[in-house]
């Protein structure tokens, strides 16, 4: 249980285009999802917290107009990188807060990640 | 702000025991999680501590001392497949913040 999928797994795009990444919780409802970015050999940096039915909460330094997040249902959150540039190339990972249970609400389950390369 | 510190790299041999420490300083604290990440992959959940003490899950155990803002992950009977990066993460109210990660190298 607690499986999170992410699509696409990798994408290459031209500078200036927009890219949409989908994150789905497959076997549980996730009221809260998180979006992270990870550069090579670095830690995961929280970009934003996505709550179903409300606006995402962005971390300091993350441009909300560049990284559009939509959490329209309890199983789907999307991240759109608008007008992508080479410096946006990174590994983007989503996670969903675990289904209610003994401790699982305080853990998160990660999608497989999306590797974005902007040329 | 939030600050989590881990050693950057640890090397051990197969069959050995290794401990990866994590100290944290956060504005809020609900619990400490540990994740494993192989190169090119996504993190996978290993263990979680909300209360002081030791949690054991197979070969992996995790310890937390809230008064010391300190925790560790203990890996026993190391296997080659355990070579990966290990991250501690603090559940700070509704958010999770990750440490810088510890690269574990397991040698034959």
Image (cartoon, helix red, strand yellow):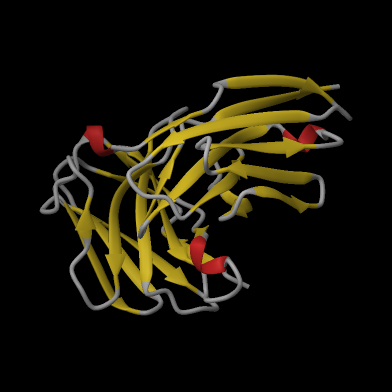
Q: Residue B66: give x, y in percent of width and height.
A: 53, 44
**Quadrant where the image shows the N terminus of chain B:** top left
Asked which quadrant contains residue A29, the reply is: bottom left
Name the residue: 46% across, 51% down: A113
Q: Farthest residue toward the left?
A: A65
Residue at 70% x, 32% y is B83
Q: Is residue B62 above or below residue A23?
A: above
Query: Along the horizontal axis of the image, is A111 left or right of B81?
Result: left
Residue B95 versus residue B62 in the image, above or below: below
Residue displayed at 62% across by 49% down: B52
Residue in view at x 71 percent, y 30 percent: B19
- Please state the horizontal and vertical placement of residue B12, each as a whole percent of the image: 77, 21
**From the viewer's perspective, is residue B74 above or below residue A3?**
above
Q: Nearer the viewer, residue A12 or B107?
A: B107
Q: Nearer the viewer, residue A37 or A114?
A: A37
Residue B63 position, x and y percent, is 66, 43
Residue B26 quadrant: top left
């Amino acid at each position: 249980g607690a499986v999170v999928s992410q699509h696409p797994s990798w994408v290459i795009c031209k500078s200036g285009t927009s890219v949409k990444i989908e994150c789905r919780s497959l076997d549980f409802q996730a009221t809260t999802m998180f979006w992270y970015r990870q550069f090579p050999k670095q830690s995961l940096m929280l970009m934003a917290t996505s709550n179903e039915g409300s606006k995402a909460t962005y971390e300091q330094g993350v441009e909300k107009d560049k990284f559009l997040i939509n959490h329209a249902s309890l199983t789907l959150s999307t991240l759109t990188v608008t007008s992508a540039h080479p410096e946006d190339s990174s590994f983007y990972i989503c996670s969903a807060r675990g289904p209610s249970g003994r401790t699982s609400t305080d853990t998160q389950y990660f999608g497989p990640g999306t590797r974005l390369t902007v040329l | 702000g939030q600050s989590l510190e881990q050693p950057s790299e640890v090397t051990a041999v197969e069959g050995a025991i290794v401990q990866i420490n994590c100290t944290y300083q956060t504005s809020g604290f609900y619990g400490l999680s540990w994740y494993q990440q192989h190169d090119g992959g996504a993190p996978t959940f290993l263990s979680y501590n909300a209360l002081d003490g030791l949690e054991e899950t197979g070969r992996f155990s995790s310890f937390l001392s809230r008064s010391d803002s300190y925790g560790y992950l203990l890996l026993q009977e190391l296997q080659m497949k355990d070579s990966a990066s290990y991250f501690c993460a603090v559940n700070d109210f509704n958010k999770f913040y990750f440490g810088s990660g510890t690269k574990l190298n397991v040698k034959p």
